[in-house]
Image (cartoon, rainbow, N blue to C red):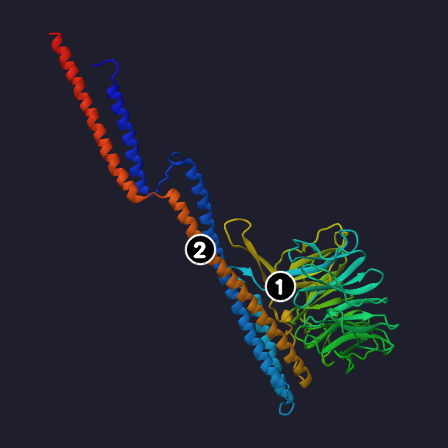
Amino acid sequence: MVINTDIASMTGRNALRTADLDFRTRMQRLSSGLRINQGADDPSGLAISEGMRAQIRGLDASIHNLQDTVNMLQTVDGAAAELQDMVQRMRDLSVRAANEATLTARDRSNIQNEIQSLASAMRQVAFDLKFNGKDLNGEQKIAFQSERTGDSEIFIMDANGNAPANLTNMAGNQRNAVPSPDGSFIAFDSFQANWEVTVIPAQGGAPINLTNHPQEDIWKSWSPDGERLLFRSFRDGNYELYAVERDGSNLVNLTNNPGTDTVPAVWSPDGTRIAFVSQRDGNQELYVVDSDGGNLTNLTQHPGEDFWPEWSPDGSKIAFLSTRSGNYELYVINEDGSGLVNVSNSLAADMQPAWSPDSSQLAFASPRSGFWNVYVVNADGSGLEMVTDNTGLLLYPFWSPDGKSIGYTSLRTGDWEIYSIDIGSGQPAVNLTNSPGYDFALTNGWHLGTLELNVQAGPDSSHHFELELRPLSPRSLGVAGLRVDTAKRAGRAIELCDHALNALGDYRAEIGIMSRRAGHVIDDNIAARINESAARSRIADADMAAESAAYARAAIVRRSAEGMIANEQSLRRAAFDLLFESLK
């Protein structure tokens, strides 16, 4: 028996330590349900399982994203369905108004009132279309020209001035950007060898020269359905108004008169009439002609100079500028030439009128305060208000599509910049461009374009897809200013309603496709989550049956080791007793 080095005791204690460690490990696994509770349990397994855990949680988050996306698309589809119902009602009313056999002028007036009420309701539905506070009625954009890159180019930017993008990047000069009613195209004047009317997709692409003639073609205006453009040309030896299809086909001379017919020329909101300025009677007068060139009417018939017509969005009135009071004043007249009203009535020059989207107000530029500023006045001449506090030259006020803000171009910093101001907010104007180059926007540059949304559809940054939501306002659908006062115009209203119904039907189909796509990705992510969770479980989770058996074994071994330690203690006492007896 060895006393100094007790190998049996050391071995027993080590066995007890190992058995106790195994026992505690098994007990921890059974308590937590996990095979790996700390890095030392399985270092490589821990690394693999944590990577899988990140993927699983990412899949959970992306499934949530996609379910929110489906709900958002259902919200858009619901709004589009409601707009379809209202356009269908407009069509029904237009069909009734087209019946000359039985309807009176009063009947048509009542029908017109209901159509205008429906258009107002459509505006409300479109601009109230939100999900979680996010606007879904397209995206507000501003098209403008800029010399920030050297030559004058056409740019487009967000309504807050962010993300300016050069659409043209062409040799020569490009100017006077005019977006189509649905915001999908930008028309502009392009100078290569001469001025041509050119169109480019609003999201970028190849420009299309619509006119392609050695004489000057400039100052275009879109038809309400976005299919045709009106422009001025010198190709016949004097200035005439022409119309052309968006692809450059079907060129038509609309005025064909030796007198000068000039711009701006504008379509009526229903596309049946065109207002323009002509000197054919010896001075500048305001004329209206059918969109096919027939039925010419002189609306103003006054020795003063009348110019700059702007048709109200509801199609009922025309604003224009005139010197008939001795200086430039802003007037409003009914589309048939009756009801003339001077709405600005100032000794100062009032210029460049722009209608609010709901046709209730006009914005215009005037130096009546000593500096050029933007003023807003009701269509009947009441409620005049100065909305800017500008100290430099100011041009071309324009409204935001929702009517809550006004933009304009100003020289207040010594450089032409584009500004916007929220009406009635009390906040100062915001410089949107703030570029050392010349920046300039026309009265209809602020528009609704396609809203591009990125959906995070998976656990990694590369797992995403894009959604595109188009604008749904009455103007973008081409039904903002339907007129049914004659059978011919009621017939045109039917055509515009058909165009809008087709557009809404196509859009709802696109929304359905996007919803199905999101639904399929949800199903795929759920399947991936299940399989990845199963794989991680095999690494990280405890096998309860195996751990229970191992726990029982560890408990027995531990108990046995404790017994051996106790037995070793009894041997020590026996040795001590023996030594004690030998010393007696």
| Residue 37 coordinates in the image, percent (x, y) | 36, 38
Gap in angstroms between the C-alphas marked 2 and 1: 44 Å
Residue at label 2? 526
| Rendered residue at 46%/45% (across/down) | 54
Q: Is residue 478 left or right of residue 459?
A: right
Nearest to the observer: residue 136 or residue 355: 136
| Residue 452 coordinates in the image, percent (x, y) | 60, 59
> What amino acid is at disc 2?
Ile
| Rendered residue at 58%/82% (across/down) | 92
Q: Earlier in the sequence, mark 2 or mark 1?
A: 1
Residue 42, image quadrant:
top left
Mark 1 nearby-residue class (10 Å; few <14, some 14–19, many ≥20)? some
Residue 486 seen in the current view:
no
Mark 2 nearby-residue class (10 Å; few <14, some 14–19, many ≥20)? some
Work out which residue is located at the far top of the displayed protein and give it. 584
| Residue 442 coordinates in the image, percent (x, y) | 73, 63
Q: Secondary structure at mark 1?
A: loop
Q: Secondary structure at mark 2?
A: helix
Tag in front: 2 or 1: 2
> What amino acid is at disc 1?
Lys
Nearest to the observer: residue 552 or residue 296: 552
| Residue 82 coordinates in the image, percent (x, y) | 53, 72
Q: Which mark is residue 404?
A: 1
Q: Is residue 350 left or right of residue 383?
A: right
Image quadrant occupied by the C terminus: top left
